[in-house]
Image (cartoon, rainbow, N blue to C red):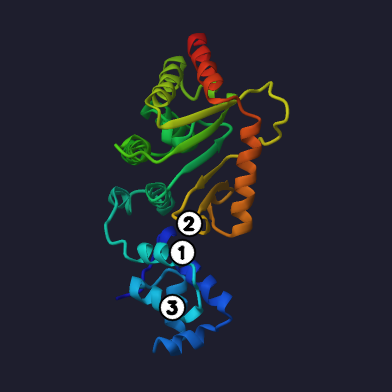
Amino acid sequence: MAPRSHPTARQVRLGAELRRLREASGLKAREVAAFLNSTSAQMSQMEAGIASVSAERIRRLAAHYGCTDGQLIDALAGMAGERTRGWWDEYRGVLPQVNLDVAEAEHHATFLHEVVITDIPGLLQTPDYAKAVFRYMRPELPESELAPRVEHRMRRRTVIEDPHPTPYTTLIHEFALRIRVADRQVSRAQLRQILNQIEQGHVGVRVIPTDQDGFAGAGASMMHIGGPVPRLETGLRDAPTGTAFMDAEPQLEHLRTLFRKVESASLDLVASRDFIHRLTKEL
């Protein structure tokens, strides 16, 4: 099979985990290549997510590396065995690759924890809200490029709206709820959309009020994506160059700690719902 020219973030993650297993075993890439009757170049491609790897080969490598974590091995084999194209693949070549990678990560998540400070979370946005955000950030986009971005964002909501929704908890700062990205009507509809999701019982929304003591996390926007095992969790942070995927354990532990700290400065679920109700009446 020809090497991939543009591996997805999930494919890159699989390769990175295989590299970590090899490094933990103390083996060099050339030694493992010889074991597989392969080459060092092919090993590099596999560990970079450029070359595909079978579930059978992953189990063989895990045994060679002396890995005894059965749950991790099963999860990695499952990632390798994925063959179904997701709905996000329809946007390949239309939207930036990172948009597809985020949707794929959310699709496979076992839970989603998010902190947002200045914008409503993408998973809760209405079409009009999303359109206003995209138009402001990218005013040069013609309608032909704006429309698929909004459509893609709306389709991401399937993870919290299908018959078996992914557990989703988001911490939203009061600023994000009050800022009018368009007009009063769009803002009111957006708040009602959030309340509707809360009432469905599959989304947990907690508000960080501006007068709450103990919150110094203005730059805390992040998403923490659960994996089949803790080691395969993923973090997303906005960076100057775009959305950054994080998978190193120190980074993930930092995100877990950050989420708990922001959560401690947030209203509880009932008080947050009531808070959003009051904001809706004010508009």
Q: Is residue 219 visible?
A: no
Q: Disc 3 to disc 1, how far (Cα)?
A: 13 Å
State the image quarter where residue 80 is shown.
Answer: bottom left
| Residue 90 rendering spot, x and y as whole percentages | 27, 50
> Can you identify the residue that label 2 sits on?
229
> Can you identify the residue that label 1 sits on?
72
- Dot 2 falls on a residue whose secondary structure is loop
Q: What residue type is labelled 2?
A: Val
Residue appearing at x 52%, y 14% in the figure? 279
Q: In this view, does 111 lie above or below 216?
A: below
Disc nearer the start of the sequence (2/1): 1
| Residue 255 rendering spot, x and y as whole percentages | 60, 47
Residue appearing at x 42%, y 59% in the figure? 10
Q: Disc 2 to disc 1, how far (Cα)?
A: 7 Å
- Dot 1 falls on a residue whose secondary structure is helix
Question: Camera-side residue: 134 or 277?
Answer: 277
Q: Which amino acid does label 3 sit on?
A: Leu
Q: In this view, does 204 lie above or below 270?
A: below
Q: Residue 61 carries which label?
A: 3
Q: What residue type is labelled 1?
A: Leu
The answer to whether marks 2 and 1 mark residues whose Cβ atoms lie closer than 8 Å is yes
The answer to whether marks 3 and 1 mark residues whose Cβ atoms lie closer than 8 Å is no
| Residue 240 rendering spot, x and y as whole percentages | 59, 48
Q: Can residue 170 be seen in this view?
A: yes
Q: Is residue 92 left or right of residue 22?
A: left
- CA neighbours of label 2 inside 10 A, class few (<14), some (14 to 19), many (20+): few
Q: In which quarter of the image is the N terminus?
A: bottom left
Residue appearing at x 46%, y 81% in the figure? 64
Q: How many labels does the image show?
A: 3
Q: Disc 3 to disc 2, how far (Cα)?
A: 19 Å
